[in-house]
């Protein structure tokens, strides 16, 4: 099975998609921890309106975390960490 990662896609296109929801995509350095990742690297992390990824973060992880934010109430989103 092939898993598409952030590095396999145009970063700007992913960032533009997230901007439609008022979110910002932030790229972490290779081999670093990912800010706000519940499962740990390479899985995406979220803090407030930022989604943190590395080049090896699976696209499905990005979309999964974004879905959490999009479905939250504004009050919950305000304290998201």
Image (tube, rainbow, N blue to C red):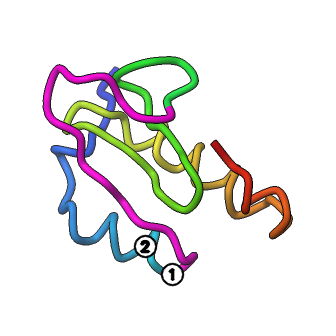
Q: Which of 29 and 1 lies nearest the eye of the viewer?
A: 29
The reply, left or right, for residue 60 in relation to residue 14 is right
Q: How many marks?
A: 2
Does the CB distance between marks 2 and 1 fall below 8 Å? Answer: yes
Between marks 2 and 1, how big is the CA–CA gap? 5 Å
Residue at the farthest front position: 79
Q: Which label was assigned to residue 48?
A: none
Q: Residue 11 location, x and y as percent?
A: 21, 61
Quadrant assignment for the C terminus:
top right
What residue is rendered at 55% in x and 48% in y? 47
Name the element at disc 2.
Answer: helix
- At a point 57% along the width and 76% down the height, the residue shown is 21
Image side of residue 37 versus residue 72, left or right: left
Q: Is residue 68 left or right of residue 23?
A: right
Residue 49: x and y in percent read 55, 62
Mark 2 — residue?
A: 17
Q: Quadrant of the N terminus?
A: top left
Specify the farthest residue to the bottom.
Answer: 20
User: Range of the magenta residues?
Assistant: 20-36
- From the viewer's perspective, is residue 3 above or below residue 26? above
Q: Is residue 54 magenta?
A: no
Q: Main secondary structure of the magenta part?
A: loop
Q: Residues within 10 Å of mark 2 (few under 14, many from 20)?
A: few
Across and down, in percent, residue 64 comes to 59, 43
Q: Which residue is mark 1?
A: 20
Task: Name which residue lies at 45% across and 18% down.
Answer: 40
């Amino acid at each position: 099975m092939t898993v598409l990662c952030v590095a396999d896609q145009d970063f700007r296109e992913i960032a533009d998609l997230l901007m439609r929801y008022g979110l910002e995509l932030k790229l972490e350095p290779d081999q670093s921890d990912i800010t706000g990742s519940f499962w740990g690297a390479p899985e995406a992390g979220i803090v407030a309106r930022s989604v943190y990824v590395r080049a090896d973060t699976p696209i499905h992880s990005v979309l999964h975390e974004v879905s959490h934010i999009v479905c939250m109430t504004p009050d919950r989103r305000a304290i998201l960490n």
